[in-house]
Image (cartoon, rainbow, N blue to C red):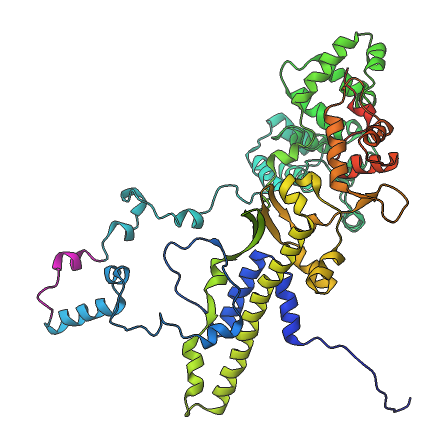
Amino acid sequence: MHLGQSQRLEQNISPQMLQSIAILQKNSLELETAIKAEVEANPMLEFDDEPLGESLDSPSESVQSGESDFDTEDTSRNSDDSTVSSLDFERGTLEDSADVDHGLLDGSTPSELNWAQYLEDGTDHTDTLYRDSVNQQKDPDDAWDRPQKDREASLQDRLLLQLRDWNGTRELMAQLAKAGCPEVRFRSLVEYLIDSLDENGFLQSADEMAMAKVMSDNDPFIIEIEKVIRNEIPLEEASLPVVEAFHVLRSFRPRGIGARNLQECFIIQAESLENFPALSLQILKERFDDLMALRYAKIAKDLGVSTEEVQQAVSSLSRLAPHPGQQMSSAPNQVKVADMKVVEKKGRFEVECYRRRVQKRLHLNQTYASLLNDKHLSKNDREYIQNNLSKAKEFIKAVDNRFSTMENVMMAIVKHQEAFFRQGPAFLKPMILQDIADEVGRDLSTISRVTNGKYVDTPYGIFELKQFFTTGIKQGSAANDEVIGSAQILEAIKKLVDEEDKKKPLSDQAIADALDKQGIKVARRTVAKYREEELKILPARLRKAL
């Protein structure tokens, strides 16, 4: 151990910079939540009164600095108290009703008091317990407060409701009790199977930790269920309670729930459908691998039927769902909230930033700020106000900086991707984050934060900013050779597949040759990569139709 001195350079990020970075990477909904939380924590921040008729989303005309709200006098707050809007006059205030009450008590009620209106006050239909039955015009806000049926119910929750309504026969209950599994125990086995389902409705075996707990509990039925799910033992060889638990689960809606693989899923659905072709069911049970490989001629030869009969039987399989659990999925819809909009004005594209209602109403509390001019203010109170005032200014400045940075980045993107906004997504050019960072003079990490989770409304739909950054393929070995964007290549591949002869689909090499004739030089392995990973298109042998 020793004691010494040394000099070194360190880069420390200030709290203001950390706050600006945190706000910059938030999307619009996260920013709205952060603003509300900051207003609750800092008394120097507040929302001004919301003007009537203001829309939720409107483009901000200009970006204000944090100091502007503090230095500019709020004319609405310093207006004469005697000036009352027509809306406030009609609604009245608590002070107005208090004056009337005092007048009633001391006998000095003004003669112009409308007794009919006063006596009716508080007994309006909208204030009654049964207002829904007597008020024809309902409050639209009530629709948001009332719980909606099955809004957040998961697949497991809905299957548990079906299990609660299920009733077994007396003979089944007697057989289960004889096998050492009373009704309560049997229902717990079905619940275990329900908990083992994934979002698609297929049974998944327990992981190592869960399996260790199952083995430690030493429950013979649960252990047997896990062996069946893992295909270690056939379902037909399991004990009666386990077999019946599988049968009960597979009888629930939608049909196909509780299968271990796609073949079982199709068979469960096919057996539950009336007048389902016997040949189709036979193909599912005996020739499923050939069906997946589209070997129709082999299926016809092995089953002793014609190819036309096989084709007709395969067409009946369109009634089956490969992912039955998705029919009862409660996953919320992903809503894209646009932060900006690109509009064309006089042949030029301009960027408009959106500010939501909460963001536009944010400003400094002038009442607390004016206390700094009070000479009788204590030292602790003055420091408290000054600290919160500084934090409020920095917060407003960080919010405004977020919008100005987003606008500058989007303007640079429009400049580099003008062909996209004029001709469509197929003309998206190759571009990397460093190109925009050099254009706006900001750090690469800043551009990454701006483009992640931010959306822009374009003439071709709403796009995330990071979608404008794509790779490309050079059309030669020279340094000045043309680079074609991946979006253009994807569009060309998709068009070739859509227009191909379904009886003779194009192979990856054939697609590459066709692209070469169009002036796009792409290797076969690149075509295969784009087809599988980006376009999700099956290979040629699986796209072939009879």
Would you place residue 18 above or below residue 200 in this image? below
Q: Position of residue 219 (x, y in %)?
A: 75, 44
Q: Position of residue 270 (x, y in %)?
A: 68, 21
Q: Is residue 97 magenta?
A: no
Q: What residue is rendered at 65% in x and 35% in y?
A: 325
Q: Position of residue 77 (x, y in %)?
A: 35, 72
Q: Nearer the viewer, residue 187 or 459?
A: 459
Q: Position of residue 421 (x, y in %)?
A: 63, 44
Image quarter hosting the N terminus:
bottom right
Q: Is residue 225 visible?
A: no
Q: Is residue 120 magenta?
A: yes
Image quarter hosting the C terminus:
top right
Q: Nearer the viewer, residue 458 or 199?
A: 458
Q: What residue is rendered at 57% in x and 32% in y?
A: 166
Would you place residue 539 above or below residue 295 in this image? below
Q: Nearer the viewer, residue 314 or 368?
A: 368
Range of residues picked out in magenta? 109-121
Q: What residue is rendered at 73% in x and 35% in y?
A: 491
In this rendering, would 118 be left or right of 146? left
